[in-house]
Image (tube, coloured by chain):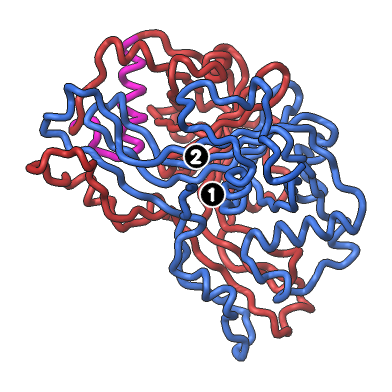
Chain colours: A red, B blue
Amino acid sequence: MTITTPLSSTERSTIHRLRERGRTSRRDLHAVLDAGLVCHVGVIVDGAPVVLPTGYGRIGDVLYLHGSSANRALLAADGHEICVTVTHLDGLVCARAVFHHSMNYRSAVAFGTARLVTEDSERLAALHAVTEQLAPGRWDHARLPTRKELAATAVLALPLDEASVKVRNGPPADDPQDYDTDFWAGVLPAALTFGQPEPDPALRQDVATPAHITAMAGRARGAGRLA
Amino acid sequence: MTITTPLSSTERSTIHRLRERGRTSRRDLHAVLDAGLVCHVGVIVDGAPVVLPTGYGRIGDVLYLHGSSANRALLAADGHEICVTVTHLDGLVCARAVFHHSMNYRSAVAFGTARLVTEDSERLAALHAVTEQLAPGRWDHARLPTRKELAATAVLALPLDEASVKVRNGPPADDPQDYDTDFWAGVLPAALTFGQPEPDPALRQDVATPAHITAMAGRARGAGRLA
């Protein structure tokens, strides 16, 4: 699989409605995933869908999810189909007509069979990816996992073979007859934004806030639009 | 069902791990749902889970999701179990140990059997809730749906009988032996924040940005922590 390999051509990962919102480039898939912090993973437990938020990381074309090794939904997913969705809300689209209200967003939906990672070196690499996804630089500025901690962490791998990417951008699209009305229309942009770091009250007084944290403070996360 | 009715007592909606993060009050469930804009709905399609982002609204103890009446995943959910999850990311929790990295968040996970809303009056009420959830005030400042538009909208109802709410707040929790190290630890707060409104380029020049939009501009959405 290379960056030019198409995302997929299966029925469920093909955008049918509003096709102009669909993206089929792997580069766009990576961009949407890399900009995120929380994914929503769907698994089937006792015949019913369960959707859980969790952190994740990406290495090439494998997505890694992590959780406690006591997380039964995560463990139960091993060998089963899961769906992982990452969504960025970029704006509220306020149209003249209620019917045309919408949101600007970037979303990625990945389908596949989950595999519980059992090898320590892959688990460590996955935790590196998950930690760096949270805040680039953390891995080099924290105590690394012990064997016991590694064992207490469950890591699921999902190959990014089959996925769909959707993007909505730009102003509202109203019906022609509605443009000449008194109703306001436009977009209220939105972005996940970081505030100022709050040092742990128990932090040793002489430890300064490191550059990789101050670099994120006061900024929006992953607000970069796709081309 | 009243505000004092417990959320549920089923196995899947009971928090087992990190029980101190669980909330069982219906008030907390409502607060988490009301602060959100996007939910992730899990449905089973051809035996596999599918997780889709969508808008929603709440009326009392019923959650309404809406989408196009051509959205097959939404239509297929009628009469079947679904799971709807709303997650607010409130901060990145940077611990001294990689293992104790976490996120501050509020999340609600609701389980139940979806019902496709067929009655026009309930569909209209649901669209009102969905529209006002997006931006309070929109319903009174937009052209209301026609019969044809109503027919082109699929609305799913989910009774909020069975749900779980989880919250993580506050600083990292490291192991005792890690506190006296050079590693920085703390929280980088995060919130979905609105920018300044971008009027539709096709907006009539004499239409000013209304107060219900300017009231949201430059502010964080639903950043209120639970008690």
Q: Which residue is mark 1?
A: A106
Q: Is residue A131 inside the magenta stretch?
A: yes
Question: Is label 1 in a helix, a strand or a loop?
Answer: strand
Residue found at the far left of this picture: A206
* Chain for numbered disc 1: A
- Going by the image, does A156 lie left or right of A172? left
Residue A96, position in %: x, y? 70, 74
Label 1 near label 2: C-beta < 8 Å? no
Q: Amino acid at mark 2?
A: Leu
Q: Quadrant of the N terminus of chain B?
A: top right
* Chain for numbered disc 2: A
Q: Which residue is mark 2?
A: A29
Callout 1 crowding tier (Cα within 10 Å): few <14, some 14–19, many ≥20: many
Look at the image and give the residue range highlighted in magenta. A120-140
Give residue A179's quadrant in the image. Answer: bottom right
At 62% from the left edge and 81% from the top edge, which residue is drawn? B203
Image: A181 above or below B36: below
**Frontmost residue, B4 versus A99:** B4
Q: Main secondary structure of the magenta part?
A: helix
- Going by the image, does A208 lie left or right of B29? left
**Gap between marks 2 and 1 measured at Cα:** 10 Å
Give residue A104's quadrant in the image. Answer: bottom right
Callout 2 crowding tier (Cα within 10 Å): few <14, some 14–19, many ≥20: many
